[in-house]
Structure formats: C-alpha cells, structure tokens
Amino acid sequence: MVLPVLALATTDYPDFTPLMLGITLGAYGLTQAILQIPLGLLSDRIGRQPVIIAGLLMFTVGSIVAALADTMTGLVIGRALQGTGAIASTLMALVADLTAEQNRSKAMAAIGGSIGFSFMLAMMLGPLLTTNFGLPGVFWLTAALGVIGIWITYFWVPKAASMRRNREAMTDAQQIRGLLSESNLMRLNVGIFALHFALMAAFVAVPSMLSEELDINGSNLSWVYLGLLGGGFFVMLPVMIMAEKFGYQKLVFVAAVALMALTTAVLSSQRGPLLTPLMLLVFFAAFNLLEATLPSWLSKMCPVGNRGTAMGIYSTSQFFGAFAGGLAGGWSMHEFGVDGLFVTISLVLLAWAFVSVGLRAPRPLQTLVLSVGNLQHQDFLKIVSNISGVEDILLVKGEHLAYVQIDRLQVDMPSLQPYLNR
C-alpha cells in the first residue's frame, strides 16, 4: 500500500529529498534481508509459531512508529522496524511442516495466488486510504493487519506443527556456501534481486510521473493501478500456460526480462499519455510472469534436502534487491532525474537478461520422504539409487528417513512403493 503513494505523500515533509524517499522505500528490505536466514534458523530451534508471532509484533510496532512520524527520518525508522518482522522464509517452512508432499505444490500455489491478489488489492487501497486518511492511515491499517495476523497465528495454526517439522523446510548454515556456488540457483537469486530492484526503483518515480506528467491524482490512481496490474495479469496468464504446454519456459522467461529492460529504456527517453501507460502495462505483465516463475523454478532446482536453506537465500536476495532498488532509485532520481532513474533500471535488467541466458530450464522433479526401515544406510543407498528415475538421495545420520529426489516422468514408482508404505 505504501508503494503507490509514498512519493506523493511525503513531499511536504521537512527533510524530503528523492534520496530520502529511496531510503524510506528500501529500509524495509534491508532489515528483512539481514534477518531472513537468522530467523529461519531460530524457528528450527524454538518452533515456527513463536518466531512468526514475534515478527508480526515487530511489524506492528514499526507500523505504529511510521504512522506517528512527521519526518522522513521517522518513516525510515518505522519502515526498518517493520522489516524486522522477517518471517517470509519461516512461513514457507511452516507450510512445508503442515502439508504432505503431494499437497505441497497446491499449498505453495495458493500462497502465491494470495500474494498476487493482495499486491493488486494493496495498489488500489493505498491511494484511496491516502486520499481519505493521509499516509498515517496506511500505516494504521498495516498495524491492524499485523494484530490480525498474530491472532490468526495463535488461534488457528495447529500447535503440534513444531513436533513434525519437515527437514527440507529447515535452514542449515553449513549448506549456504554450496548453494551460493550452484550456477542455476545463483542465476535465480540474481534474478529475484534484479526484479525487486527494478520494482522498488521504479516506484521512486512512477507515482509522481503519473501525477505530474499525466495529471492522474487521488482515487483515480487506484483505477490506473488496477488497470495496469489487472491488465498485466491477463496478458501474462495465457503466455505462462502456453510456455508450460509447449516447453518454451526459458524462452518466455528471458523474453520477459528483456521486455522489462526495453520498457524502462523507452521510459527513460519517451513518455506520453498513451506511451507511458502502455510501457507500464508491459512492465507489470512481465513482472507478474517473472514473480510467479522464479520461486517455482527454485523449488524444482534445489538439491534434495536443501530447499529450506535455498528459500532463505532466495528471500534474502529478494529483500536486498528491494533495498538496493530504493537506494539506487532515490540516488539516481536525485542526481539525474526521471530519465536517469529509468536508465539505471534498464541497465540492471539488461545485465539480468544476459545472466538468465545461461539458466537451465527446470525438470519435473519432486522430493519424496521414504522410510529406511531396518536397512543400513549403505544398503538402502545401493537399492534405491538403482531405481529408474531416482535423481538424488539425502540420508541423515541418526534418522530412519531418506529424502529422495525423483523425476516424475521417469520414476519407477512400484519399486519405491514398499518404502512409502512402511
């Protein structure tokens, strides 16, 4: 809700500058990025629920501080406090704890859909709330939503979840170096960094650009954002379906990155009543496609047993991107104006396009949790590794479970069935 209004609602603050605007937008991402993995590790030790409730409590406190702020400095402090509620990776781990493997993809898809819907709703509500209640109204609502989140977590989340945590959802600090050196995961992490860099940097300029250059103000901004985001969603959806059906995922992925780079390059030099909305529509369509594709590819490319750590690195990269985008966007706007800002975004996206060319398209992999039973680990490894379609096996010392990565199209399930039934 803050993104579409912050640039317009803070111009009267005594210490307002484009750079301070960028820092205010990015402060949330900085503290989120710093704390994602530590809070994930903490949740493995003390349970998901205490970490989630504490995170939501800090988010609520930060919202109240921002609501009471009358300077940009106060907003930066409030936004940074909001970001200390860095529970994204912990929430994903909780979903893995609460769902069986065969239902996990559906659960993740449902969460992804709710994130997309809430983003669209927030972009509409932000301008409406600011028009009627000012910027503090936005932060008071986020504080109320934080309290509601605490209530839901405490009363609705099953208390026994922490007793059967899924190892794949846990964060392991020892795995980080290996995952950072894996080329495909590195490209995905660079991608989510660049994507949220572009989004946050763009919103340093987009609200004032719509207001000053196209004379769109107040509640009319809500309808413009609905058209841009909703239109972008309907443009993106058939493209995703066709790419999945005909095996053109990588081509569509790289093309979407290139399109984002192209739209920002055009906006750096040419803008107008028709061209600006068209370029923003294409920008948001490509953004929606990439935002939906990146986590799906990540889950399919993770080495067996490493998904929790990989998701923590991914979330950290995402929020560092948001911080860097706000900071670089504010600096570029301050030094070079709107044109220079969009040149900066275009260069970052162009670099991402080159990096993504080397990305390997994901295979239809799935992780199964099998019972080792009374077999020795070495005997189990010899038997299962020779079964058709088995790609990778993780055996944990002291446990009688094995995490086995399979190719869904090639796996010999009857041979694995005895280990599923024990």
Image (cartoon, rainbow, N blue to C red):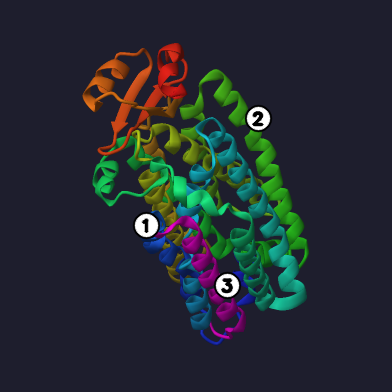
Residue 4, given in percent of the width and then of the height, sits at 63, 63
Q: Give the amino acid type for the residue marked by disc 2 in the picture.
A: Pro
CA distance separating discs 3 and 2: 38 Å
Viewer-nearest of discs 1 and 2: 1
3D distance between C-alphas at marks 1 and 2: 43 Å
Q: For the point 63% across and 60% down, which residue is it?
A: 155
Mark 3 or mark 2: name the one nearer the start of the chain: 3
Q: Main secondary structure of the magenta part?
A: helix
Q: Secondary structure at mark 2?
A: helix
- Against 318, residue 53 (above or below) is below
Vertical side of 43 occupied by 164: above or below: above
The C terminus sits in image quarter: top left
Quadrant (top left/top right/bottom left/bottom right) for the N terminus:
bottom right
Residue 75, given in percent of the width and then of the height, sits at: 53, 78
Residue 330 lies, in percent from the top left, at: 47, 68
Instruction: Name the disc covering residue 238, or none.
Output: 2
Q: Are marks 1 and 2 in contact (CB under 8 Å)?
A: no
Residue type beneath disc 3: Thr
Quadrant of the image occupied by residue 242:
top right
> Badge 3 is on which residue?
60
Q: Which residues are magenta?
A: 46-71
Horizontal side of residue 371 vs 241, given as left or right: left
Residue at figure coordinates x 34%, y 26% from the top left? 373
Percent position of residue 38, x then y? 36, 60
Question: What residue is pinned by disc 1?
Answer: 45
Disc 2: CA contacts within 10 A as few (<14), some (14-19) or many (>=20) = few
Magenta span has 272? Answer: no
Work out whether residue 189 can be spotted: no
The reply to whether callout 1 and callout 3 are in contact (CB within 8 Å) is no
Q: Is residue 302 visible?
A: yes
Q: Is residue 394 left or right of residue 237?
A: left
At label 1, the amino acid type is Arg
